[in-house]
Amino acid sequence: TTAAAVHVFTSQIKDLLGIHLPRRRGLLKVVYTYYDVFNAIDDINIAAMVIAGITIIAVVFNNEVLKPRVSRYCAFPIPIEMLAVVIGTVVSVQMNLHDVYNVSIVGDIPVGLPIPELPPLELFPSVIVDCFVITMVSYSISMSMALIFAQKMNYEVDANQELMAQGLGNLVGSFFSCMPFTASLSRSLVQQTVGGKTQLASLISCFLLLFVLLWIGPFLTPLPKGVLAGIIVVALKGMFLQVKDLFKFWRLSSTDALVWIITFLSVIILDIEYGLLIGALLCFAKLIALSMKPYTCKLALVPGTEIYLDTNRYEKTVELPGIVMFHYCGGLNFASKLHFRKEVFKATGVNPQMELNRILKMESKENASESAKNLRVIVLDFSALVHIDPAGVAALRNLVDDYMKIDVSVYLAGCSGK
C-alpha cells in the first residue's frame, strides 16, 4: 500500500503543478511519468500550484492543529475538505481561473444514470485473463486497505465477506456499464481522515454521489483540479508513514524486510500487478524455504525445575548425562527429512552411519568416538510436529534403526494422537 500511494501521488502531480502530461500505462509507468514531469517543468502553472499549495496548507493545518483542539469541545470535526471544495469553486467562478489563468478544472460532469442492460457476454473469452489479473490486484488492494483501517479502528475483517461484497458489487455494476471497482486508496483515506468509521459513512457518500450525478454535477464544473489533488495528497500521509514498518520488519526478520523492499520497488518501478505478483512469489518461496528447514534445538534441564529449554538460548541449562533431547518444530516430510536427519546428527554429535563404519573397520566397539560412547538415549520431542508424511515416517524409521545399530535408544515424546 505504501508503493501504491506513490502511484496515487504520481497521478496527482499534473494537477498539483498545472501541467499536461501524456497518460502512461504498463511497465515503468511511474518512471516515464516523472520523466515527462521534468520535461514539462517550464510549463508549470503558477496559479494552479498556488491553489494546490493553499489547499494542502489549509488541510494540514486543520488536521494537525485545529482538529486536536476542536475535538476537546466538539465531537463534530471541521469539514475542511468540503469547505475547500466550496471555496475553491466560488473563487474559480469569481476570478475566472480557467479562462484567465488557464487553470485546469473538473469540467462537465454527465448528469443521470445509464440504462441497465445485459453486459456483452461474447467478450468474456477475450477478457478472461485480464479479469483474473484485475481481480487479484483489486482484491489485494481492498484487503490491504481493510486491514489497515481495521488495525486503526480495532475491529476484525472477514476476508470472505470482503470478497463476496466486492464480487456482488461488480456483478450488479456490470448491468450499468460500470468499470470494475475496488477500494480507492485516496478516497478511502479521505473518508477516514474526515471521521468516517462505519458503513454508514460510505452509504451517505453513495447518496451524496447520486445526488451529484443527478442534480449537483453542473455546479462543480468550475472546481479547480488542484483543490482535489491537494486533498488527496494530504490524505496519503498515513500511507507514506507506513514506510516506518520497514525498520520493524528488519528488527524482526531481515528476510521479511527484504521481501518488503523488493515488492515496494517492483510496484513503483514496474506496476502494481507485477509488484504484487513478485511479492506473492517471494512470500511463497520464503514459505517453501522455511518448510524445508524448520526450527530445531537441543533441550536441557533448567536447574531446580522440570522445564527443558533451548541450550543455545539459555546458557545455564544442564544436559542430562548420556541423554540428548531434540526438539523439532514443523512438518516432517519429503522436503524436510534431510534437514531433520542432519540436525539430529548435529545435536547429538554422533552420525550413526559413520560410527558404524568405524566400528566395522576396527572390528571393535572400543574404537567408537567419545560422543558415541557417552550417548545412550535420544529423546525426540515431537510436541510441535504439525504433520508427517510417508517419506517422513520412512526417514524417522531409518534414523531409529541406524542409532539402534550402535546401541543408542531413540524415544518419541509429545506425539499427537491425530
Image (cartoon, rainbow, N blue to C red):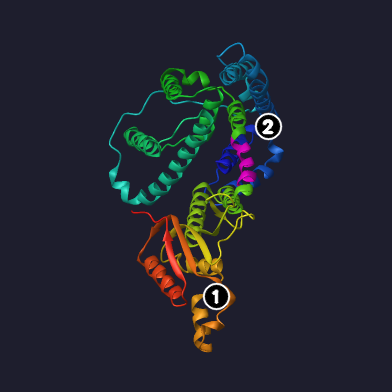
Nearer-N-terminus badge (2/1):
2
Choose mark 2 or mark 1, whichever is in front.
1
Q: Is residue 411 magenta?
A: no
Residue 360 relative to residue 113: left or right: right
Residue at the spot x=69%, y=37% of the render?
43
Q: Quadrant of residue 415?
A: bottom left
Mark 2 residue type: Asn
Identify the element where label 1 is drawn.
helix
What span is colored magenta in the figure?
A: 239-249
Disc 2 crowd, CA 10 A, few/some/many (<14, 14-19, 20+):
many
Q: In which quarter of the image is residue 78?
A: top right
Q: Residue 173 at what x, y percent from top left?
A: 35, 33
Residue 310 relative to residue 213: left or right: right
Residue 20 makes an appearance in the image: no
Mark 1 residue type: Lys
The residue at which mark 2 appears reads as: 45
Along the line of sight, which residue is nearer the eye, 384 or 350?
A: 350
C-alpha distance separating marks 2 and 1: 85 Å
Residue 271 makes an appearance in the image: yes
Q: Look at the picture and state if 99 lies above or below 183.
A: above
Disc tally is 2
Q: Look at the picture and state if 408 lies above or below 25.
A: below
Along the line of sight, which residue is nearer the eye, 187 or 300?
A: 300
Identify the element where label 2 is drawn.
loop
